[in-house]
Image (cartoon, rainbow, N blue to C red):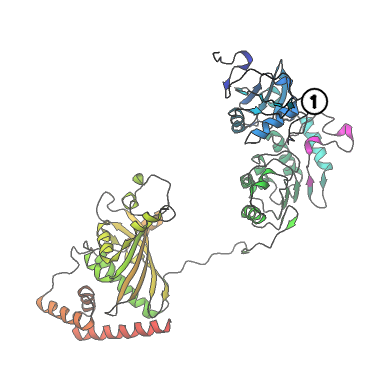
Amino acid sequence: FRNRKGRGHFRGHMHSQPVRQRLRGGPVGGFGPGPRSRLEDEDGDVTMSDGQDGVPHMALLLQIPYGKKYDKKWLLTALQNLCPLPFSPIHYSTEGQKVQFYLDDATSANALCKLTLFLKIKICLMFIFFSIQVVVFMNPCPPPSFLQSDLKEQDLEHLKQCMSKRFDRSKQYLNLSSIRTDPGKIFKLSLISQNIEVILNRRTCMQAVIKIIEENVPELACLNLSNNKLYKLDDLAELVNKAPNIKTLNLSHNELKSERELDKVKGLKLTELWLDRNPLCDHFKDQSTYISAIRERFPRLLKLDGHDLPAPIGFDVETGTTIPPCKGSYFGSDEIKEFILRFLQQYYSVYDSGDRQPLLDAYHEAACFSLSLPFSMHNPSRSSLGDYHKDSRNIKKVKDPATRFRLLKHNRLNVVAFLNELPKTQHDTASFSVDVNTYTQTLLAFTVSGVFKEMDGKSRDSVRAFSRVFIAVPAMNSGLCLVNDELFVRNATTEEIRRAFAAPAPTPSSSPVPTLSASQLEMLSAFSQKSEMNLEWSQKCLQHSEWDFSRAVQIFTELKVKLNRCICRGV
């Protein structure tokens, strides 16, 4: 047989193919209802998604051909048990032989329609089992008239009276549990008797309730919303501003499927929360995980589902307390400060010179180097740091162990070769901030942060911020030998760019060693042999002493003694 498109009232998007029904009738006869469902009310009405004015923009009409022959409760239960998302039918009705109802959530409607719905009824007749196939059609349509109107003025007054009877002023406690089916102490004055439906999943109803709270009990401390079939908390978010003093909130016996719904009300400073008998409670592997997830959103929580929680760990900061200003560099002692600053001056004078090959003398034979950039979901090729991305070893992004190992530069030859491939730079030494993390007789670890400017390539004159961790051991020449170097580069902030290079910096030389006279070269060679330092550092020391050999030896000896004394005190 040829498949035909839906016609007439059934025309729409068909998500499962119908087949001829081989089993007449349904479970009504003597087979009873299907599995127990949460949809236990008679009409199952909830609202649909509203626009900003509280009126739905579009409805989703679901139709089930030949659905009339099935018991309503059984049919809805079977659909709910098969659908991966919760749904609540709106205005369940029959027209001819078909059943139809509205859904307020497009995601749930699509999930329901995409199922190949075999509602298997295990009926044994002469050892034969039967299956029933139900086909669901979905049609977008204008919202029905009964959903387009807000609560009338007299309805709001009845609602206000009902809420007043449920309010305990001494405890600032409002009990709205099962407000939809409120019988009232005097039936003729109840919401049911007045044919008023207060469905808190409807935006208009929730807004009406919150408005009454705001105008009459803004100091509300406890609110009970249990047994209202709430499956979303979007409209409850207004409570954060309208009733900010709420400390106790009861959301138990509702239809909340995900703890993410609580993000919409996490602005409340709750100390007590009830969530039991919600589907979300079944998603956690144990109680501690459940408590942790909820307390992440409400850190002041002291009681959950009636059970006391351990006191939260936090810091009580008085209102108006000013945060102390950020301190500058930390060295631990003046001796360490002088030693590190001299090292940084020598290191970055070579690094910014245009030829970084002399840095070989600064690294240990088995040194390691790594480069990292901030973790970003953006396309690296479109990033202004694109030139660095291929070598970034950010372990938050790089998960493969082999790739991590490959991006780690091993031994000093590979380290310096890689440094030579990086863009030419000019560092703003005035921006440097140094923090000494560890110093012992055999180890010195410190972090230097600041800004630099790229001097070539397509990013010429771009200002970057950096943080660099150096781990060093004593060198044979009483200097430092780097065993580990970790460089982190990011784009500078607007403030960092504004403050960068405020003081004029000398233009780096194209050669790390300027032209020297014959006598200076002879003195440089002699000093290097005596101090056991390399030529670059020996030159810096002689320049600092204005090429006075005796004074340079004296300064070097004093500095060596101070450093050894300082390192011994740090053990």
Question: Could you say which quadrant of the image residue 239 lies in?
Answer: top right
Task: Name the dominant secondary structure of the magenta segment.
Answer: loop
Q: Magenta span covers which residues?
A: 174-201
Label 1: few (<14), some or many (≥20) within 10 Å?
few
Q: Is residue 387 visible?
A: yes
| Secondary structure at numbered mark 1 | loop
Q: Is residue 149 visible?
A: no
Residue at the limit of the structure toward the right, as seen here: 186
On the picture, is 338 further left or further right than 255?
A: left
- Name the quarter where the N terminus is drawn: top right
207 shown above or below 534: above
Residue 7: image location, x then y, percent = 60, 13
Say what amino acid the circle numbered 1 marks.
Answer: Gly
Residue 552: image location, x then y, percent = 23, 83
Give the labeled residue for mark 1: 30
Is residue 176 within the magenta segment? yes
On the picture, is 7 further left or further right than 537?
A: right
On the picture, is 165 further left or further right than 233?
A: right
Q: Nearer the viewer, residue 24 or 439?
A: 24
Q: Nearer the viewer, residue 397 or 29?
A: 29
Residue 558: image location, x then y, percent = 30, 86
> Residue at left 63%, top 36%?
85
Question: Could you say which quadrant of the image residue 372 lies in?
Answer: bottom left
413 shown above or below 226: below
